[in-house]
Each structure stands twice: as structure tokens, then as C-alpha cells.
Amino acid sequence: MPYTRWDGLKKGAYRAVTVMEPFISLGLKEGAHIIAAAFYRGGEVVAPALTPEQRRAYYDAENKAVDLINADFYKYAHHVAASAKGALEPRELLRAFVRYKHVDYYDPELFGRAYEWMKARGLTDGMSEHATLVVP
């Protein structure tokens, strides 16, 4: 869990950890340094047994939440800051490390280019084509 990784870093058990907000802002507040940063997105990962209608309803709800959060981030920031267990106030979250965006749909052509790149470098065994991983 992110809090456990952050705690381990503070106690010296780790020299570097991968964390997300609120631990990036908390780390900077407490003197940590960023050695690499990236955004990731996992909201498109849903149960494959969902019907197309259920999946669409989920994505629509997620997109609506994104719009609400982006319109007034600090109205909702306390939910993100809660993981820091009181060590970080919601107003201390740095917007530079928080990014909420609408659902991305995995285009078969773009997926294919990335997948071919991975296959060429031995990063996949070639058994996970777009049609087997991505549910329309």
C-alpha cells in the first residue's frame, strides 16, 4: 500500500519508492526528492463480465466525476488527502501531480503499434492481442 511504502521510506527501509498523491505532496513537504514522475490511469479497467450498457454507465459516471473534480478540485481534495492520515492538509496537495481526465478508449491501431514494439523487444510473448484484452 502507498502509505506503507511512504512509511518504509521515512524509516530508511527503502531508498526510493513509487507513490501517488497524497504522498508525493507529503514527501515534498517533508524533504523528499522526486527522481521520476508519470501519470497513470486505471479507470478503464473494469470487470470483463459487464454488459456494454453497464460499462457505458460506469464510464459515463467516471467522466461526470472527472468534470466535477476538475471544476473545483479542492472541494474534493480531502478524499485524496485522507490517505496521509492527517500529515497533509487538503490545501497542501499540489495540483501538478493530480490529473483527472475522461476515459480513454484503446484504439486498435495505437495498441497494435505499442504491442509490436513490445514484441520486438521480447517484452511480451505475443499472446495478448487487442481483441483478447480490450472489451469494446
Image (spheres, rainbow, N blue to C red):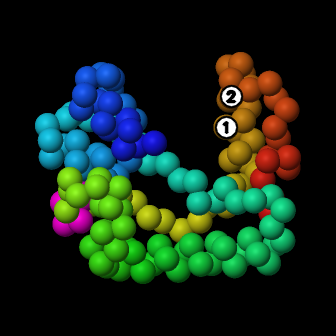
The amino acid type of the residue labelled 1 equals: Ala
Helix, strand or loop: magenta stretch = helix
Secondary structure under tag 1 reads helix
Q: Residue at x 84, y 62 (%)?
A: 49
- Residue 70 position, x and y percent, is 37, 74
**Magenta span includes 91:** yes
Q: At 26% across and 35% down in the image, what residue appears?
A: 34
Q: Quadrant of the C terminus?
A: bottom right
Q: Are marks 1 and 2 in contact (CB under 8 Å)?
A: yes
Magenta span contains residue 65:
no
Tell me the residue that label 2 is attached to. Answer: 118
| Label 1 CA crowd tier, 10 Å (few <14, some 14–19, many 20+) | few
Residue 78, x across and y down, in percent: 30, 69
To which quarter of the image does residue 3 belong? top left
- How crowded pointer 2 is (Cα within 10 Å; few <14, some 14-19, many 20+) is rated as some
Q: Which mark is residue 114?
A: 1
Q: Position of residue 24 (x, y in %)?
A: 29, 46
Q: Residue at x 75, y 59 (%)?
A: 47
Q: Secondary structure at mark 2?
A: helix
Q: Magenta part of the protein: which range?
A: 90-94
Q: Amino acid at mark 2?
A: Met
49 to the left or right of 39:
right
Note whether residue 97 is visible: no
